[in-house]
Image (cartoon, rainbow, N blue to C red):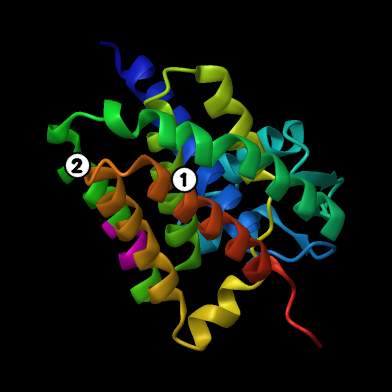
């Protein structure tokens, strides 16, 4: 492998890493809609140069997560409360019945890995790292849906989650309640491992419904 090829791979990897972290920060509500963020300031935050940040911004702009502000940076796209309600309704139609469907199909040897993914959500909550929490939460839920062997489903749910704004996470973290929320994912794994299909559908439905209340912007 040539040095040039290796450098290109490293560049793409860095761009992807920054894209993931920016996306998670937007979803977690750490980056406020309406505020303008510059590539140099975000580069300093992520410990990289402004170049991969600008490249990542182009990716997020294509996904309509941000709007490019010429010569300044970008502005996070606003999401209306109705949009968040609509996202919740669609997720409720898709995720609980699909996870119920795959519950008897998940191999026993996969449960340690699923528990590890759930534990990463808890670790993010314990550290108060909302970006880590949000990214780990997305990986966990999409991993469960992956057992349905339906890539279109995973892409759809991933897109829905990318356009969510979890404004209330910071408030939960400050009140010390985010860790309890995170541990719900370990409970989901426990129920799936028990092979109780009805219980897992019911619990996941409750989990998603309660999450919608946690997304709301705190009152001024």
Cα separation, mark 2 vs mark 1, equals: 18 Å
Q: Which of marks 2 and 1 is in front?
A: 1
Count the numbered circles shown: 2
- Return the residue found at the far top: 1
**Residue 8 horizontal/vertical position (percent):** 43, 22
Residue occupying the point 51% across, 41% down:
96
Residue marked by disc 1: 201
- SS category of the residue bearing label 1: helix
In the image, is 52 to the left or to the right of 143?
right
Residue 48 shows in the view: no
- Return the residue found at the far left: 109
Q: What secondary structure is the magenta-colored segment mainly?
A: helix
93 is higher (above) or lower (below) than 21 = above
Magenta stretch holds residue 28: no
Residue occupying the point 52% across, 63% down:
45
The numbered disc on residue 111 is 2
Residue occupying the point 49% across, 80% down:
173
Residue occupying the point 83% across, 55% down:
78
**Residue 103 horizontal/vertical position (percent):** 33, 34
Front one among 170 and 105: 105
169 is higher (above) or lower (below) than 143 = below
Q: Residues in magenta? A: 119-123
């Amino acid at each position: 492998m040539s040095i040039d090829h290796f450098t290109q791979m490293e560049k793409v990897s860095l761009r992807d890493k920054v894209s993931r972290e920016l996306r998670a920060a937007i979803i977690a509500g750490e980056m406020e809609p309406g505020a303008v963020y510059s590539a140099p300031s975000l580069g300093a935050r992520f410990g990289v140069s402004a170049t991969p940040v600008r490249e990542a911004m182009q990716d997020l702009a294509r996904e309509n997560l941000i709007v490019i502000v010429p010569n300044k940076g970008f502005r996070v796209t606003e999401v209306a409360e109705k949009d968040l309600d609509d996202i919740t309704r669609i997720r409720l139609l898709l995720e609980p019945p699909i996870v119920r469907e795959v519950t008897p199909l998940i191999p026993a040897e996969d449960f340690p890995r699923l528990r590890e993914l759930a534990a990463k959500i808890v670790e993010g909550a314990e550290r108060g790292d909302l970006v880590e929490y949000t990214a780990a939460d997305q990986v966990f839920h999409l991993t469960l849906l992956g057992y349905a062997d339906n890539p279109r489903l995973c892409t759809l749910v991933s897109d829905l989650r990318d356009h969510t704004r979890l404004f209330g996470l910071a408030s939960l973290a400050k009140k010390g309640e985010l860790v309890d929320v995170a541990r719900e994912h370990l409970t989901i794994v426990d129920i799936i491992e028990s092979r109780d299909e009805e219980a897992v559908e019911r619990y996941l439905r409750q989990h998603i419904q309660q999450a919608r209340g946690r997304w709301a912007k705190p009152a001024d």
